[in-house]
Image (cartoon, rainbow, N blue to C red):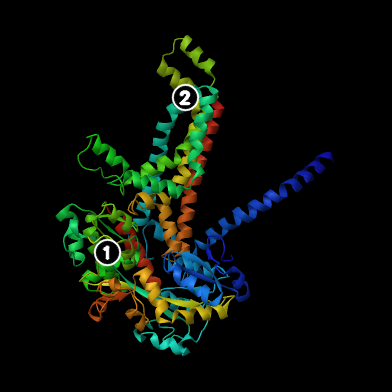
């Protein structure tokens, strides 16, 4: 499986690129600003191809099944750990680059890679609530969110994601979103079940449904802000009771055919102006400290996007829970089947 | 001698087909069967140790403990079967009269109609289902029309309900029901109908004794072709059901793409296959019996 096919090929400097070779990225959908790739190709002459996936497991299954031809993947932190354990990643020594000082050490989260010898922290974001203030009034957290249908008649949706949905129950019960205790998982499930009557659907269609007025609020990623820059009524909030966050790292595959180019890309991404260019289109956070000063004013001044330390303290990040995933699978299907 | 040479020639002729089926059908099936009794690997894949609780999990003993019985996966299986059966019934009710109507059209209009029936296959299923999403949503086409006509005062709640899932499945499956039905109706021996009416049978009797038995193979064929993909469908419940009208196909997908439990997904697939085989066997023996009477 070569990284062509469905890839959007950004062979801008095709002639020059031939001499410099190529670089194959395998990333989440809509998770990198195309301008970053264009700029990389302009500067280095390396042609970049981009394939996308929609879950860590999908990416892992493909790489495990022997997909070759990819140089760089963007796993979430817990998947980063799994991939190192499985021997799928290559040491890059990116931490010895002089620009590595730009990276805030708080983002070196991978347990298997505490010093960033393998991967470079890429981006992070929060999962919270988008709401149409004209319909719902001010919303500060989950309690307000679940009360919307009864109070206003507006509809609400949750993400179609097992861990994210059960995490809401954990947060409201004060248990860890990574709990593997059956009783805690059951209690979290019960919380969600108690509020399921208010939930219209489990879906990722939040931005279009919110824009068309078909829902009043939805559980979604901070990146959704990109759709709501011209709609002052639609706001994003990180729930007061707590929320989840995600972080992905840039990792080089052990099977990468273009290791030298992959390293060049990681070094390129260490530059603050490049990380800031990505944030300007992605609306998420960056571990690159100086980059935060270079982002557009609207992003810099929004405390729900450019998150401060106090907000950071109420965020939890998903860890790999191993075999306990079965517990969650059953809980999740119970939630979805309950009438 | 001649016979033997013929059979050798036939063997050589059929070898590529047999090989193709063996490699691309039986081998994957064998892998699924094998995986369904292995231990789930921690990070996806399997560990090479026998584990029978994958099937226990389907039937309610999810954690390999007899004391805890929670048949959630069984419920989802039963729900999928009833949705699929409902789809068969609705497509049949929809297509049966239409098949008669089309068979009476002129040659030219019949061709036009056949073209229209196959038209949806020209575009992707996902795109067509998203079109339905736009039609069914509260601010969508259907509700806008109903509101404008004054038929309803508040938008109908169809999207993200089981109704939307069944509607979507019926929409997807109509051509599969129509084509075998149409061919059965088209081959109907009309002189028998005339004879039946001439000899004093009323319309109902004629339908039950003459028309229905003759079109039964078409009904059975359509029912089987609609039922089988309906049981395993996961796209329609995902898009139109808001992931609430969960079906067994969704469950299989989930085991591979998010729960990392390949053996459980394989066991679920084996159960779907067992159900489908049972349905096929029943319909084949029925068809034989019907054939014996004729």
Question: Does dot 1 land on a helix, a strand or a loop?
Answer: helix
- x, y percent for residue B84: 41, 43
Chain ID for label 2? Answer: B
- x, y percent for residue B210: 48, 20
Chain ID for label 1? Answer: A
Task: Give residue B205's quadrant in the image.
Answer: top left
Sort mark 2 into few (<14), some (14-19) or many (20+) by Cα contacts within 10 Å.
Answer: some
- x, y percent for residue A39: 48, 73
- x, y percent for residue A278: 40, 72
Question: Does dot 2 land on a helix, a strand or a loop?
Answer: helix
Count of labels in the image: 2
What residue is drawn where x is 68% and y is 49%? B17
> Is B231 rendered above or below residue A171?
above
Residue B67 visible in the snapshot: no
Separation of residues labelled 1 and 2 (CA atoms): 52 Å
From the viewer's side, name the closer residue of A326 and B140: B140
For disc 2, the marked residue is: B100
Task: Give residue B153's quadrant in the image.
Answer: top left
From the viewer's side, name the closer residue of A157 and A28: A28
Q: Extreme right residue here?
A: B1
Residue A189: give its label.
1
From the viewer's side, name the closer residue of B238 and B81: B238
| Left or right of residue B133: residue B219 | right
> Is B48 rendered above or below residue B7?
below
| Left or right of residue B274: residue B70 | left
From the viewer's side, name the closer residue of A104 and B125: A104
> Is A242 rendered above or below residue B149?
below
Residue A70: give its label.
none
Q: Which of marks 1 and 2 is in front?
A: 2
């Amino acid at each position: 499986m070569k990284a062509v096919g469905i890839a959007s090929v950004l062979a801008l400097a095709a002639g020059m690129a031939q001499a410099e070779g190529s670089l194959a990225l395998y990333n989440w959908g809509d998770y990198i600003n195309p301008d970053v790739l264009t700029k990389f190709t302009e500067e280095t002459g390396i042609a970049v191809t981009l394939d996308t996936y929609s879950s860590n497991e999908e990416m892992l299954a493909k790489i495990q099944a022997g997909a070759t031809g990819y140089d760089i993947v963007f796993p979430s932190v817990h998947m980063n750990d799994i991939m190192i354990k499985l021997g799928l990643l290559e040491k890059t020594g990116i931490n010895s680059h002089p620009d590595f000082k730009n990276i805030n050490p708080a983002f070196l989260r991978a347990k298997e890679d505490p010093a960033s010898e393998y991967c470079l922290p890429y981006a992070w974001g929060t999962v919270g609530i988008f709401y149409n203030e004209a319909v719902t009034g001010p919303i500060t957290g989950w309690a307000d969110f679940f009360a919307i249908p009864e109070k206003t008649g507006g509809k609400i949706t949750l993400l179609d994601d097992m861990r994210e949905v059960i995490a809401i129950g954990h947060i409201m019960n004060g248990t860890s979103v990574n709990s593997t205790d059956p009783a805690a998982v059951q209690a979290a499930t019960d919380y969600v079940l108690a509020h399921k009557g208010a939930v219209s659907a489990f879906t990722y269609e939040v931005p279009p449904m919110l824009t068309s007025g078909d829902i009043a609020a939805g559980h979604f990623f901070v990146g959704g802000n990109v759709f709501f820059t011209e709609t002052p009524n639609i706001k994003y909030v990180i729930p007061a009771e707590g929320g989840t966050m995600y972080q992905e790292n840039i990792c080089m595959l052990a099977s990468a055919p273009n290791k030298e180019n992959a390293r060049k890309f990681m070094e390129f991404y260490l530059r603050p102006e490049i990380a800031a260019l990505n944030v300007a289109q992605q609306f998420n956070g960056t571990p690159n400290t100086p980059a935060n000063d270079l982002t557009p004013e609207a992003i810099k001044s929004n405390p729900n996007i450019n998150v401060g330390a106090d907000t950071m303290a109420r965020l939890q990040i998903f860890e790999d829970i191993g075999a306990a995933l079965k517990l969650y699978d059953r809980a999740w299907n119970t939630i979805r089947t309950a009438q | 001698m001649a016979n033997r040479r013929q059979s050798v020639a036939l063997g050589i002729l059929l070898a590529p087909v047999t090989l193709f089926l063996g490699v691309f059908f039986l081998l994957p099936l064998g892998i699924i069967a094998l995986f369904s009794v292995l231990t789930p690997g921690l990070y996806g894949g399997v560990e090479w140790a026998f584990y029978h609780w994958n099937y226990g999990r389907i039937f309610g003993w999810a954690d390999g403990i007899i004391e805890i019985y929670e048949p959630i996966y069984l419920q989802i299986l039963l729900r999928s079967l009833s949705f699929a059966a409902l789809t068969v019934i609705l497509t049949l009710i929809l297509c049966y009269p239409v098949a008669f109507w089309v068979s009476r059209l002129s040659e030219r209009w019949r061709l036009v109609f056949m073209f229209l029936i196959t038209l949806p296959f020209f575009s992707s299923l996902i795109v067509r289902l998203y079109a339905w999403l736009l039609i069914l949503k509260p601010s969508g086409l259907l509700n806008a029309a109903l509101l404008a006509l004054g038929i309803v005062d508040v938008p109908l709640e169809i999207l993200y309900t089981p109704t939307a899932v069944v509607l979507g499945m019926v929409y997807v499956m109509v051509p599969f029901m129509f084509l075998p039905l149409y061919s059965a109706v088209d081959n109907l021996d009309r002189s028998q109908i005339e004879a039946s009416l001439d000899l004093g049978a009323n319309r109902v009797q004629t339908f039950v004794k003459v028309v229905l038995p003759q079109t039964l193979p078409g009904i059975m064929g359509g029912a089987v072709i609609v039922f089988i993909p309906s049981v395993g469908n996961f796209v329609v419940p995902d898009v139109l059901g808001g992931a609430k009208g969960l079906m067994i196909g969704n469950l299989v997908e989930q085991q591979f793409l998010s729960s990392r439990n390949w053996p459980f997904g394989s066991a679920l697939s084996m159960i779907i296959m067992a159900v489908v085989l049972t349905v096929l066997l029943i319909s084949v023996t029925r068809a034989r019996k019907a054939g014996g009477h004729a």
